[in-house]
Amino acid sequence: MKVTQISIFIENKSGRLAEVSRVLGEKGVNIRALSLADTSDFGILRLIVDNTDLAKATLKECGFTVSKTEVVAVEVPDRPGGLASILDILDKASVNVEYMYAFVERSAGNAVIIFRFDNVDDAIRILQEKGMTILPGERIYGI
Amino acid sequence: MIWDPLHECLERPDLERLQLERLRNTLRRVASVPCYRDKFARAGIGPDDLHALQDLARFPFTTKEDLRLNYPYGMFAVPMKEVVRVHSSSGTTGKPTVVGYSRKDLNDWSDLVARFMTAAGVSSEDIVHIAFGYGLFTGAFGLHYGAERIGAAVIPMSGGNTERQLMILKDYGATALVCTPSYALTLADRMEKMGEDPRRLSLKVGLFGGEPWSEELRREIEKRLDIVATDNYGLSEIVGPGVAGECLNKRGMHIFEDHFLPEIIDPETGEVLPPGQKGELVLTNLVQEAIPLIRYRTRDITRLHYDKCSCGRTLVRMEKTMGRSDDMLIIKGVNVFPTQIEEVLFQVEGCEPHYLLVVDRVGSMDTLEVQVEVNENIFFDEMRKQRAFVDMLEKKLATTIGLHAKIKLVEPSAITRHEGKAQRVIDKRRM
């Protein structure tokens, strides 16, 4: 029930993000979801792509520092209060969210929230107990 | 193994007797060199004023500036017809300094290098890959002659073209590597990038020199290449490599005192410091014919140890150089040696050896930025952890060097690699 995400260290200067997307594009890697955390010096770019291994190898070859992490994708109806319902569950169970980002599915009309937890397995169990829909990696890579 | 037990294991009174005799001869020979004639006259001193080794402290120093002022051949003590070779310093700033060798000097040089190569465990069984650039720089030729003198097989590879270096290293089966310590890491980096294991090379020992390096860097090289990494010391003005070298105890470099008389001075006052004190190394040539220098200020900061080494050599040991009295950075009034910062970085598990110090001045305030290349070991997917790592490094640096340095994480290979000496400092201040 986990989704593999790759994180890339990029210096905060012009052209680095473009470079990442260019080399991935050249290899035919499609980006499914993206988030960027940045400081004045550097940023951490997180990507979910359709071919994680190829993306990681390609970026490493181009000299980027890349790591793989497991995140959790939760599907909620795309309507007001959707996100709040999940956060409420997590808060009550004292599950700490390291970071999160979201996107909307084109066809299904649902929103997908990507969560990075300290303790992934516990978080999945709690969300499932509360009847939340957790999307397997294959679903996200293939969107 | 000891190459020249007669000279490397002399009892100190015998050594000092030999040094005094040789020093007296050298002073007489240089007295006719215009630069020394003037210096001695100004100091009101001459060769006959030397009665004991301690009297040397009364003689004036020689500096790189003297060599520049007498460029190119003004410091030579023999006519050009007796000179068979000319070398010069790597000269990154200004005119290079020029040195000459007589036939005997070249012969002596070969033996001096053979001494430290033997001390590092090199023998006639070895294949020695020399990756120093051949040319005016003394490094490559010095090691070349020493290895030949020992009877080892020499591969005069020269510098540059890392890919080709690796092919030759693998195919020719070198057992000893000669280069700068930073280039040894470049070779390891490149192999690992190509998916190969540098530990599988047939290398057993590395003889590294040409730039100061820390104990941490030594451990890193030894681990990644699975070799014994030894340090040696020399400077072109004095002879080139062959002034001093480590034995396998790796407890300092034995200075070949029958050829070079070492003193440690306070770089500010010029006073000779007592044994064991840290200061600037000053060397006097005792044997050199073509260009013997008296009390040459090396600008290298070190410490001398006179207690006996278990290897059997009685020669004094100098510590790894801890920086230079003239490239010492003064930032916000604090003296900083780049090697201090290197030590801190290497103490952090998984930290990349590639770093660059950028010194600048904003208004009237000095700033120090330490750029560190990020690798997988120090990259965290969570910003909180990444920031905590930066804070930890900054804190460690502050306690070590006594001032705040900003850590800037940069992408791998963002810092330019040099095939020769690593550039570790960019000083943008106009002083």
Image (tube, coloured by chain):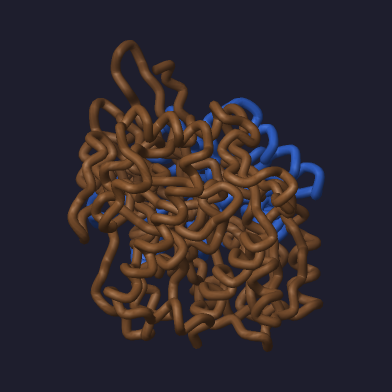
Q: Residue at x 68, y 68 (%)?
A: B145
Q: Residue at x 40, y 56 (%)?
A: B23
Chain B: colour as depicted: brown
Q: Position of residue B173 (x, y in %)?
A: 74, 80
Please indicate, yes or no, whether residue B298 appears anywhere in the rendered image: no
Quadrant (top left/top right/bottom left/bottom right) for the C terminus of chain B? top left
From the viewer's side, name the closer residue of B275 and B32: B32
From the viewer's side, name the closer residue of A51 and B18: B18
Q: Is residue A7 left or right of residue B136?
A: left
**How many numbered discs?**
0
Q: Residue at x 72, y 58 (%)?
A: A54
Chain A: colour as depicted: blue
Q: Position of residue B286 (x, y in %)?
A: 45, 58
Q: Position of residue A57 (x, y in %)?
A: 69, 58
Whether B56 is drawn above or below A2: the answer is: above
Residue A56 falls in image quadrant: bottom right
